[in-house]
Amino acid sequence: MRESKFQLYKDTAGEFRFRLLSRGNLENILHSTEGYSSKQMCQWGIESVKRNCRIDSRYQRKQASNGQYYFVLTAANGEQLGRSEYYTTKAAMENGIAAVKRDAPGAPVEDLTLVKSRY
């Protein structure tokens, strides 16, 4: 079984972002809600996810205008840390929250911004 992991990457605008991939199928279960201007700030965002993810009151459960469900993970100050993908049912959304609680605290970070040399 594949282990969960955070991926740190640069988006097309040049900002740093992260996503959490679940164990097993490596599906994206949480991604940063904002771009960060530095890699260090993005790493701090990941650490904040790890600190806050097991606290149920940090999750805002929402329903989009298209009827699908999603959640937002917030910090103690209410700042958004990450957002889920869309789910077709409330139960699936709750499973997504459970996966973040289970996977995020110990997930390693894969830095996709590093250039690998052939030499």
Image: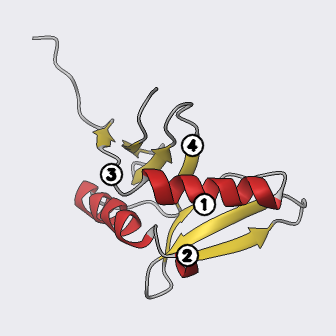
| Image point (27%, 54%), residue name | 39
User: Residue 13, position in %: x, y?
Assistant: 46, 49
> From what the image shows, is residue 106 above or below residue 55?
above
Residue in the foreground of this view, choosing between 10 and 26: 26
Mark 1–mark 2 Cα distance, whole angstroms, equals 9 Å
Pointer 1 or 3: first along the chain: 1
Query: Is label 4 in a helix, a strand or a loop?
Result: strand
Q: Are marks 4 and 1 in contact (CB under 8 Å)?
A: no
Mark 1–mark 3 Cα distance, whole angstroms, equals 15 Å
- In the rendering, which numbered label is found on residue 106? 3
Circle 2 sits on which residue? 56
Quarter the C terminus occupies: top left
The amino acid pointed to by label 1 is Ile
Q: Are marks 4 and 3 in contact (CB under 8 Å)?
A: no
Badge 4: few (under 14), some or many (20 or more) residues near its Cα, within 10 Å? some
Pointer 3 or 2: first along the chain: 2
| Image point (55%, 75%), residue name | 56
Circle 1 sits on which residue? 97
Q: Nearer the viewer, mark 4 or mark 1?
A: 1
Mark 4–mark 1 Cα distance, whole angstroms, equals 12 Å
Residue in the foreground of this view, choosing between 72 and 57: 57
The amino acid pointed to by label 2 is Asp
